[in-house]
Amino acid sequence: MQHSRTPCRSWGLLLALALVAGGGAPAPAFDGERAYRDLVELVRIGPRPAGSPGAAAARELIGERLRQAGWRVDEHPLRVEVDGQGIDMTNLIGVMPGERPGLVLIGTHYDTKRLPGFVGANDGASGVAVLLELARTLGDAPRPYTVWLVFFDGEEALGAGITANDGLFGSRALARQMQREGDLEKIRGFLLVDMVGDRDLGLTEDVGSTPALRQALVEEAARLGLEDVLGGGSVALIDDHTPFQALGVEPVLALIDFRFGGDSMPGPLWHTTGDDLSAVSAESLNSVGRLLVEVLRRVERETVAREGVEGAR
Ligand SMILES: [Zn+2]
């Protein structure tokens, strides 16, 4: 995960607008403590860089949890060649069929940065833990649209940072595959979750995300009394949503705290061995999970309303 360009906007105006919004159904019970237990299990595996035994163990845990929650699990293997080095990677997708055509993708990455002793409690495990708890929260009742919980491999660059051909390997591969097969048009929304466990949570406004979904996030945060988790500044973030956006997918929303362990970006703990259990909290997972559930429901509701009108014309 990294950022591009310079900060140029803040949550402030959006928050002011949100105060006039309201209503809607109560959130299902997303359990941050239960999510945290999966985070701990992932961290106990140790380092989980793409192609490692740790990544394979993480995959096993993810698949098991999804199946326990009643979700189908698809594996999408890919092989990446960088500087003569071949790495086998695998995207995992939890699938819950929907009532009508169309897909909502909710993504995160499960690989960790290849650094000695790096266990990625926040950068790697937090997004996975939130998506696994989301699977349990949503359960096995069909949604309006098919939901894919996508666990991307190879988000982290092999070199220092993400470039045009390093990092985002899993998401670039899935985006290209969906483009080839004509499936990108089926996407009704793409929500990306990464680095959401920071015990001092402050989600960063991704100025590249779709304005309507940024606004929806602010409104839902106000409705849930979670305004204080949106204090992470503004910047254009590069993560696994970026390859999909580059191919025209929208709406897109990234939920990322890119001030990890401090007030600077990316923060003093980012890609350091300080990214361990002492840096994250169940409460942060709970806040993001509750927000994610509400934003998902909103995407579903608003898309159903729009497509219903279009269908009637
Ligand atoms: Zn990272």
Image (cartoon, grey):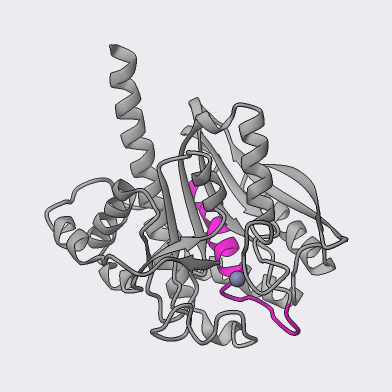
Question: Against 148, is 26 above or below?
Answer: below
Position of residue 58 in the picture relative to residue 136 (left or right)? right
Q: Residue at x 24, y 46 (%)?
A: 24
Q: Quadrant of residue 81?
A: bottom right
Q: Quadrant of residue 35?
A: bottom right
Q: Which segment is the magenta one?
A: 115-138
Q: Residue at x 35, y 53 (%)?
A: 27
In the image, residue 118 lies in the stretch drawn in magenta: yes
- Residue 250: image location, x then y, percent: 43, 40
In the image, residue 130 lies in the stretch drawn in magenta: yes
The quarter of the rendered structure image containing the C terminus is top left
Residue nearest the observer in this picture, 210 or 121 = 210
Residue nearest the observer in this picture, 262 or 9 = 9
Q: Determine if residue 283 is in view.
A: yes
Question: Against 268, is 283 above or below?
Answer: above
Q: Residue at x 71, y 71 (%)?
A: 159
- Residue 37: image location, x then y, percent: 60, 71
Q: Residue furthest top?
A: 313
Q: Determine if residue 71 is in view.
A: no
Q: Quadrant of residue 236?
A: bottom left
Number of labels in the image equals 0
Position of residue 77 in the picture relative to residue 133 (left or right)? right
Question: Against 174, is 126 above or below?
Answer: below
- Residue 131: image location, x then y, percent: 55, 56
